[in-house]
Amino acid sequence: MPDADKSAQLARDFALMEQTVREAGMLGLTMFRTELRKWIKGESSPVSEADIALNDLIEKRLRAATPDYGWLSEESADDDTRLDKRLTWIIDPIDGTRSYLAGREDWCVCVALVERHRPIMAAVYAPSTDEFFLAARGQGATCNGRPVQASSGVALDFSRVAGPKPLVERLTHPRQDLALHPRIGSLALRLCWIANGRLDAAFAGGQSRDWDLAAADLIVHEANGRMSELSGDLIQYNRLDVTHGLLVAAGADRHAHIVEQFRANRA
C-alpha cells in the first residue's frame, strides 16, 4: 500500500477508534451503578453484562470497518489467526470491572491498534471522571484534547507512586513508613496517570494481559514516558502468550533511574 493510502487508512482508523471508544464509554456509564447480571470467569475474574455489551458494541463497530485486522479482546474467544495479521485491535471493554461493579469511578474503556507487536494508536476513556486519553505513534498524547506530559526528574515521592507495595519496597532504600498512592482499580488508568503527570511512577505486579496494557503503553510513551518490564525491555503484544510479568512506567528519566535500581538490586 502506498504511504499516502496507508496514512489515510490510519487516519480513518483513528477517527473510528475515538468515536467507538466514546460510544462504548457512554454505554458503560448508562449501565453504571445499576443492577447487573454478573459472574466469575476462570478462577476469580469478575465479568458482567456491561462488559459483554461494551465488547459487542466495540466489536461491531471496529470489525465491520476493518475485517482484515486481527482481534484480541478480554471478552472474546481468542482467535489465533490474529498472530498472522500485520494490524490487530486489542480491547478491554471495561478495565477495572471490580471497581465498576462496586460503583467506584476508577474504570475505563481501552482500545489499541497494534502493528506487529507494538501499539500505533490508542484510546483510554474513563467516563465517570471525564478523562479521554488519545495517542498515535509519533504524534504525542492528549487528555480531553490537551497535550499531556509525564513528570520530569528522578526523585521518588512515594505518595505519587502506585502499585503493589512489596514490589515498590524492592527499590533502593525506601522509607520505612512507605505510604503509596491509594490503589487504582484500573491498571490502564493507573498507567495513564503517568502520562498526565498525576503520578510519578506506576508498577504492575504480574499476570496483566495485553488488553490491560497496550493502549496505556502508547499513551505513556507519547507523553515522554517509558513503560517496560523491570529489565527495561519493551513489552511485546499480540503474541501467543498475552500474559506479562512485573512492569514499571514513569517519565523517561525516572524510568531509567528505577530500572537501574532494580538491576543493581538483582546483581
Image (cartoon, grey):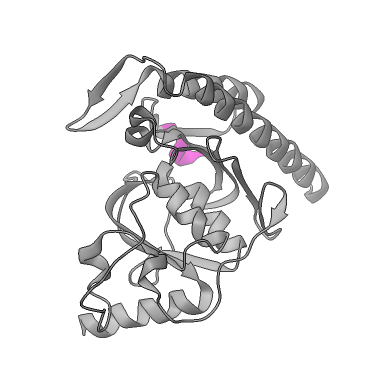
Where is 232 relative to 115, above or below? below
Residue range in magenta is 81-85
Task: Please name whichever residue, 180 or 220, is drawn nearer the observer in this view of the structure.
Answer: 180
Look at the image and tell me in which quarter the N terminus lies.
top right
Which residue corresponds to the image point at 63% horizontal and 31% vertical from the top-left? 22
The image shows residue 71 at horizontal and vertical percentages of: 49, 32
- Residue 228 horizontal side relative to residue 42, left or right: right
Where is 146 relative to 261, above or below? above
Q: Does the magenta stretch include residue 189?
A: no
Where is 101 relative to 245, above or below? above
The image shows residue 173 at horizontal and vertical percentages of: 25, 84
The chief SS type of the magenta part is helix
Residue 213 showing in the rendered view: no
Which residue corresponds to the image point at 61% horizontal and 63% vertical from the top-left? 223
The image shows residue 108 at horizontal and vertical percentages of: 48, 38
Q: Does the magenta stretch include residue 84?
A: yes
The image shows residue 171 at horizontal and vertical percentages of: 27, 77
